[in-house]
Amino acid sequence: MTFTASEFDYIRRLVLEQSAIVLEEDKQYLAESRLLPLARREGFDSIASMVAWLGAKRFDGLHRKVVEAMTTNETSFFRDFHPFEALRKSILPELMTKRACSRELNFWSAACSSGQEPYSLTLLLQEYFPSLADWRVRIIATELSAEMLARAQDGRYSQLEVNRGLPASLLVKYFRQHGSDWQIREDLRRRVEFQIINLAETWPLLPPMDVVLMRNVLIYFGVETKKRILSKVRQLLKPGGFLFLGGAETTFNLDDAFERVQFERSMYYRVRKT
């Protein structure tokens, strides 16, 4: 069921052209694990036969499914924990003081995958900041994959998924059980606005942001694409806004207008004051 180096090169070019994501040469095993189920669902007897079909056709729905399969990222509730502690203990209290006149806060969860990150933020606000109930708070969650975005909008997770990072007290309080799955309450789902955005292409109009969560996605892009994305994030942030990246990501040598700030065991970025 494996495929050749030339077939993998075709997949790498397709993903790069459509998403600007760079698949390294040593990721063939990942491609096989993600594309074999797709090939079977689409009626092919192997990945190789699906790649041959793709190569003979113009870009269409199956090409898009292949790209989405290769760009779906790992996620979990309250992933890495420490960024959410920084939000709870330091960042949100600071923002609430600074935005007291406008009473408005905007958050962006970029590359939200199946939705655990924006819902974790929603739960954080609901549980620890009840005074925000009469503020205008927007949580915008975006994703390249339409399939992942549909999953996120549904807000339904398996027992294994809710066991990963979600405290039992929040599960019981804010989720409803459906058979072996758990679904976040409808009123909380409605607080998140979901959109399809390809970070490497033109972005739709977004409101100025107080907090941008763009974690564990820049690592998949080439240097020039990273620079373009960070430049656009910088222009999108409100004065005094915050950017969170993944633990293996940095703005260093990419956009020196950002400065790194450490809070306890978490790192975040702010635009340097001029």
Image: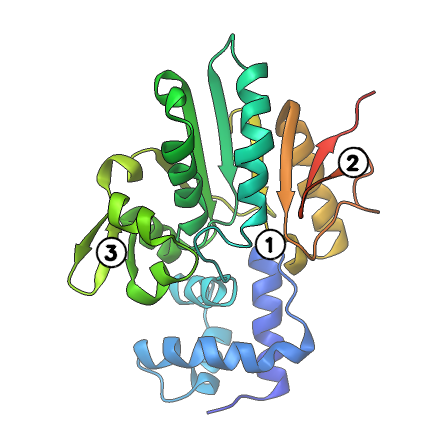
| Residue drawn at the location 62% of the way across and 42% of the way down | 244
Decide which of tag 3 and tag 1 comes sooner along the chain: 3
Residue 120 figure quarter: top left
Residue nearest the observer in this picture, 73 or 50? 73
Asked if residue 272 is positioned above or below residue 220 in the image, the reply reads above
Q: Which mark is residue 259?
A: 2
Q: Which mark is residue 182?
A: 3
Decide: few, some or many residues near mark 1? Use Cα within 10 Å; few <14, some 14-19, many ≥20.
some
Q: Which mark is residue 41?
A: none
Q: Residue furthest left?
A: 179
From the top left corner, tell me how far across and down residue 261 is, in percent.
74, 38
- Whether residue 214 appears in this view of the structure is no
| Residue drawn at the location 62% of the way across and 62% of the way down | 16
Q: Amino acid at mark 1?
A: Val
Residue nearest the observer in this picture, 233 or 128? 128
Q: Mark 1 and mark 2: span between their CA atoms? A: 19 Å
Q: Residue furthest top?
A: 101
**Residue designated by label 1:** 217
Residue nearest the observer in this picture, 274 or 146? 274
Label 2 secondary element? strand
From the top left corner, tell me how far across and down residue 154 is, in percent.
27, 50
Q: Amino acid at mark 3?
A: Trp
Decide: few, some or many residues near mark 2? Use Cα within 10 Å; few <14, some 14-19, many ≥20.
some
Q: Quadrant of the C terminus?
A: top right
Q: Amino acid at mark 2?
A: Glu
172 left or right, relative to 198: left
The label nearer to you, 1 versus 2, is 2
From the top left corner, tell me how far across and down residue 204 is, in percent.
51, 34
Label 1 secondary element? loop
The label nearer to you, 3 versus 1, is 3
Evaluate if marks 1 and 2 touch, with contact meaning CB atoms under 8 Å apart.
no
Count the labels in the image: 3
